[in-house]
Amino acid sequence: MAESERIRFQGTAVGKVELPERVRSPWWELGRRLLAALGILVGTVLIVYLDRDGYRDSTDGSVSLLDAIYYTTVTLSTTGYGDIAPATDFARMVNAFVVTPARIGFLVLLIGTTLEVLASQGREMFRVARWRKSMGEHVVVVGYGTKGRSAVETLVNNGQDRDDIVVVDPSPLALQDAHADGLAVVTGDATRREVLRRAGVADASQVIITTDRDDSNVLSTLTVRQLNPDAWIVAAVREQENAPLMKQSGANSVITSSDAVGRLLGLSSLSPTLGSVMEDLLTYGEGLEVAERDLLVTEVGRQPQSLPDQVIAVVRDEKVYRYFDPVVTQLARGDRLIVVRPAKELPWAPRPGTHDEDFAVEED
């Protein structure tokens, strides 16, 4: 459980039901309150007209329906010309205990609503402007379905700040889910340049593309690559035959979902134990984790097999070598290690007890 979720849970009474906050448009709120103000106006007109014998008009002495409307509007707006006034005790009591509270409620609705609409719009504009200024080197996730949510969860669990993740998805359900997860959302089609610009793709360091259609993924990848030649793009495809096309479109890494699932199913069928290990490696926070970390100074010159971590690959000069490759028989400065380790350890950090040691950074 994330720290923020744990704190929120501890502060919530057990058994208390909390429904998600309903967010409505400011214009919807304005319309609703205007209707309430109109209801107060109509109700007061009826009260005055039904008791019209208790009022005196200085012009002709009687109060008509038009006079009741006139009296109500000038009274609720606190104008009060005084040409029509309550004359009987009952009419005065009604004005004191009914019309006066209605006047206060009428003014609060109109003035309060106007101020709230202006304040909420200004506040939202300020928040968006501040968010855009802070964006840079962030992660854009195109598609917030099952794959997109899993990708975001993995990023967050490995230290990525939620404020540095932007979701692009046209679905209202995805918008609701992403907001519930504390993520910024740009609603729209990720194949359109304007939508991607609003998500700050030009300044993003990484882009993850996970829609359910391979053709949309290809077009989104092409558009992202045009807007940002340097971004690291990871894209998903449903069919293996589309993987080469995705790489030609500009993706740095392509994940074939159907092929990966099929392979896991086959392994689980041939060897249930092997299937469970593979599932363990793909599940965050339990059992084993696959992680990438920097080489430590004390590990320079050693063999990958001799390290405390179970090294399965070495990254050198942007190329990946298997741990038994003769090229990486001895580890060198600047190498990065792909390791398998217990999930309880931080995937991006050295093993416990070595956190203060220097990394073996390649010298200029």
Image (spheres, rainbow, N blue to C red):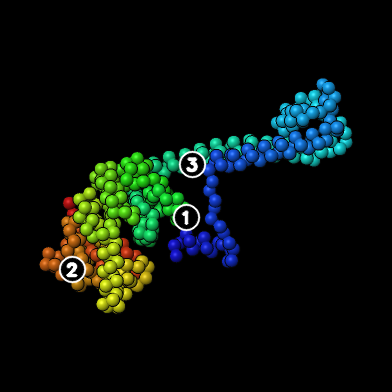
Closer to us: 208 or 156: 208
Left/right placement of residue 87 relative to residue 320 reads right
> Along the line of sight, which residue is nearer the eye, 202 or 353?
202
Q: Is residue 161 above or below residue 89?
A: below
Which of labels 1 and 3 is toward the front? Answer: 1
Residue at position x 24%, y 65% from top? 338
Residue 180, given in percent of the width and then of the height, sits at 47, 55
> Which of the two labelled residues, at mark 1 and mark 2, occupies the earlier sequence position?
1
Residue 82 percent coordinates (x, y) = 79, 25
In the image, which is nearer the foreground, mark 1 or mark 2? 1
Amino acid type, callout 3: Glu
Which residue is denoted by mark 2 in the rendering? 323
Residue at the far left in the pictured view? 326
Query: Residues under labels 1 and 3: Cα distance?
Result: 18 Å
The residue carrying mark 3 is 124
Q: Is residue 331 visible?
A: no
State the SS at label 2: loop
Q: Are marks 1 and 3 in contact (CB under 8 Å)?
A: no
Q: Residue at x 29, y 71 (%)?
A: 265
